[in-house]
Amino acid sequence: MPKSQLQCYGESVYCTSEDILTKCARGKNSLERFIAVVAWAISTTRPVIFGWAPFNPVLGETHHVSRGNLNVLLEQVSHHPPVSALHATDEEERLELIWCQFPVPKFHGKSIKASVNGKRHLKLLSHGESYEMNSPDLFFNLFPVPGADWAGTVSILCKDSGLEAELIFYKAHSFLGFGGNSRLIKGKIFHSKSSKIIYEIDGQWDRTIFLKEVHSEKTSVLYDARQTILNLKTPIVKNLQEVKPTESVVAWGEVIKDILEEDWEKARDDKREVEERERRLRKERICKGEDWVPKHFKISQNKEGHWECWPLESSVPPSPIIVPP
């Protein structure tokens, strides 16, 4: 199904067969909640299909979906560079997610590295806990065997409980693209102050990841990808009249329709029209001396070039687009 990159970001939050976010909020103690947050962070890493590219979101494009009591809203707050902001709330479970993401590509001869910059903040309001984490980087191998995969180090920190996790996503090492284990992940959960390791983490992020308690050496399943991201349900429109014109499926509607009908020439023309309209609007703003302002977020850029986003509203309203129960 053709879609916008904004939809892909949103799907990593609301498209799950197992409600891991609720587990984060319902954990009996800080350690149990932290383990659930680690599992949730891993669940947002999804396999990438090499050769298939989502649409680059246009400035001001939005994506708004509800799954049960979880309401998720994304907005493209910058086009050059591309910066996407996400705000999700579940008032019943009293959790909030704020996410600012901006990929920075670099060419390395045989591959392209897309550093996924930006922080994710998950707040469990009933417990007074805030978790900060980053994302692994995305690598595109051009040859000898084309492919795409995630790699890099992810840090998860909860200053309120003094717990921290380090996850290392490994690139596959093989000869001419054959052999070698891919999508390996290793990590640990430890006390921030003492660096004392509580759990060790090991497995494959697209299959099963195990959690081993260091003291007792007991092993349990931390995350089962097949249980979490298989048999996903496609969002449906509950109220067409309330869908905003900036919604991804509206902004790219004609292009999506053309691709599904395999009318490739019309798809190219309609895609070009969306992009040219974006350029025209930008030129008009420049001529008028106007700055574009996001509707749902406040944004800033520091001296190092990193972006930060804050939602303008404390909660996200229910969406006319829902994930069916």
Image (spheres, rainbow, N blue to C red):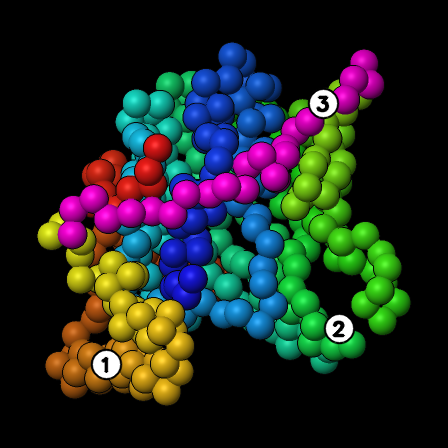
From the viewer's perspective, is the residue at label 1 or at label 2 nearer?
Answer: 2
Q: Which residue is mark 3?
A: 220
Residue 40 is left or right of residue 164, and the answer is: left
Region in magenta: 216-240
**Looking at the picture, which amino acid does disc 1 mark?**
Arg
Residue 145 badge = 2
Q: Relative to residue 209, is residue 85 drawn left or right?
A: left
**What is the secondary structure assignment of the residue under circle 1?**
helix
Residue at 63 percent across and 34 percent down: it is 224
Q: Is residue 220 above or below residue 318?
A: above
Residue type of the residue flagged with mark 3: Ser
At 58% across and 34% down in the image, what residue appears? Answer: 227
Quadrant assignment, res 277: bottom left
Q: How many neighbours does mark 3 have within 10 angstroms: few (below 14), some (14-19), or many (20 or more)?
A: few
Tell me whether circle 3 and circle 1 mark residues in contact (CB < 8 Å).
no
Q: Is residue 238 magenta?
A: yes
**CA gap, disc 1 to disc 2?**
37 Å
Residue 20, position as x, y percentages in the image: 50, 30
**Residue under pointer 1:** 277
The image position of residue 33, as x and y in percent, is 53, 22
Foreground residue, 195 or 113? 113
Residue type, numbered disc 2: Val
Q: CA distance from mark 3 to mark 1?
A: 53 Å
Question: Against 324, is 295 above or below?
Answer: below
Mark 1 Cα shell of 10 Å, populated few (<14), some (14-19), many (≥20): few
